[in-house]
Amino acid sequence: MRKNNGAIKESYNDRVFLTFIYIFLSLLMIVILYPLIYIVSASISSPEAVTSGQVWLWPVDFSLEGYIEVLNNSDVIRGFRNSILYTIGYTIIAVFLTIIFAYPLSRKNFYGKTFFMIFILLTMLFYGGLIPEYLVVQKLGLLDTPWAILIPKAMAVWQIIIARTFFYTSIPEELVEASEMDGCSSIRFLWHVVLPLSKPIIAVLALMYAVFQWNSYFDAMIFLRTEALFPLQLELREILITQSESGANQDIAEQQKRQQLANLMQYSLIVVSSIPVLIIYPFAQKYFVKGMLLGSVKG
Amino acid sequence: MDQSLDGSKEIKKVTQRHLAKRSFQRHWQLYILMILPVLYFIIFKYVPMLGAVIAFKDYNVVQGIIDSPWVGWKHFENFFNNPVAWDLIRNTLFLSLYQLAVTFPLPIILALALNEIRDGIFKRSVQMFTYAPYFISTVVIVSMIILMLSPRSGIVNNLLEVVGLDAVNFLGNSDMFRSIFVWSDAWQITGYSAIIYLAALAGVDSQQYEAAKIDGATRLQKIWNIDLPAIMPTIVIIMILSVGNLMALGFEKVYLLQNPLNLGTSEILQTYVYKMGIINADFSFATAVGLFNSVINLILLVIVNTIAKKVSGNGLW
């Protein structure tokens, strides 16, 4: 948009400034990429090479031992499966609830919409606190059940606002009136007309909720006791963080070897747990940006 | 109710009722659909707000929230009489302010820099790679930090050894905790946070740039006089939101980064609430501490919003 068409040449100062910007952005990109590349390289290097500090950037002594170890770890596999189920279940519930709440709020003559908006915005200002929230989940008997993961965070105000803005701008009131003329009920209209027209917003919401659920560990940590219900992130925490802190007093060769393997598995585990997010990243990037933009339009 | 001669109020009321009636007739199915989401908000957001009254009670499971005895400000007094309280408040504030000082300006700088360069592979790569860390989970980020900073085999200490320095136990040092937390956060969210500013910059009228160019403005002058004013409303809104969340900082990450050696700076109000409440089951006391935290947040939000509105004319409400 701001290209030079040769009419006015960039001054010397401007060229220096632009060069400085390119250097800054390049450095930034290196700083951000380096840890990611390092982790991937370490995950496919031999355990000895990683521990002895031979891996700097590229893999040394290519080896898939870490990955084999991860795939043989039944806790990880179970956590992975649980996380997939939680993410799918949660995303369906969350998108459904968000849409049935946001759509009515987008209609022009929907009485009470200001009330409902204030009703949800107030929850952003006033926060009951961790303990009262925990007690509600406990009282409902959801503790240590999958519902404790699926229900308490099922809607986010930000997402409702995004969805409402979308419906407001892309489902014209005339369409509603025309369908009412034909005797179409609100629910049928929502199901047969609105939903097919709302694929982009459904994608935005689903991706946002799915990434949130896949990455979260805290609710699982406070609400779940049974290990069989643990999501992947909680298993990761056990293996990557809780374990790595203990284990300073091991110096026998066998234990060292196990320590190395554990160390190595940590790198592969990081990669494996991020694969689902990596797969959707190209879509997620696009739709997250879209979501941010929708959310920033004041409705 | 009102017998005023001026009937406009009465008319308004009648119209309101009429509108409501028409809306209910027309949209009754939508109102029914909304029951479920509304129940969600009542149960998981409003009930906990009321449940916070246990901060003023001695909550026990047998008697429940309603019947547990009132104790007034006892739990608050206990908290503030404990020297730990001031450490926690100081840790929370220092960490937040440090985080704000770093993670607030960086996305603005990134957005302004990206806006200067032409569309192309380079620009798209920068954007794609800088967003990426946002999608990595907190557990994974913390694991990466622990692995890379490990005193035994971490890459950072290997580097230090190469240049002849002694290995540092970064995470075991409470002086370094804040920097580790803040800069890893900057690493993760700068690219993503820049999106909103880039969007605002995309809305700048290109004629302004043309005019500036004809007047012989340098790039820096254009940024200063066109770009910054254009994104100022966005900056103000993000500022208000950040300050409003000052005491609610990435507590899930703080908790994961904690270890006995760095607790001196890494114990913040919210991790304390978690430990007292969920682990020690001292529900009332923990709720009191949490409530104190939320109230401070709310007060900060209101203050910043008022200032912002006075100074720039922009505010959340």
Image: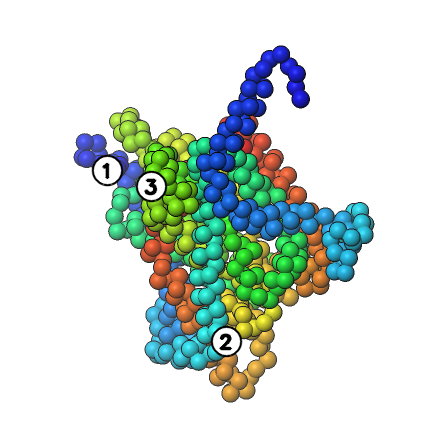
What residue did someone put label 3 on? B115
The type of residue carrying mark 3 is Asn
Q: Is residue A112 visible?
A: yes
Asked which secondary structure carries label 3, the reply is helix
Please report the residue visible at 30 percent of the width from the left and 50 percent of the height from the top: B124
Task: Kindly report the distance in space between the C-alpha atoms of the residues bearing marks 3 and 2.
Answer: 46 Å
Between tags 2 and 1, which lies in front?
2
Compared with residue A225, is residue B252 higher up or lower down, i.e. above or below? above
Q: Are marks 3 and 2 in contact (CB under 8 Å)?
A: no
> Compared to A61, does B111 lie above or below?
above
Q: Quadrant of the C terminus of chain B?
A: top right
Q: Which mark is residue A3?
A: 1
Q: Which residue is mark 2?
A: A75
- Badge 3: chain ID: B
Q: Residues within 10 Å of mark 2 (few under 14, many from 20)?
A: some
Distance CA(mark 2)–CA(mark 1): 55 Å
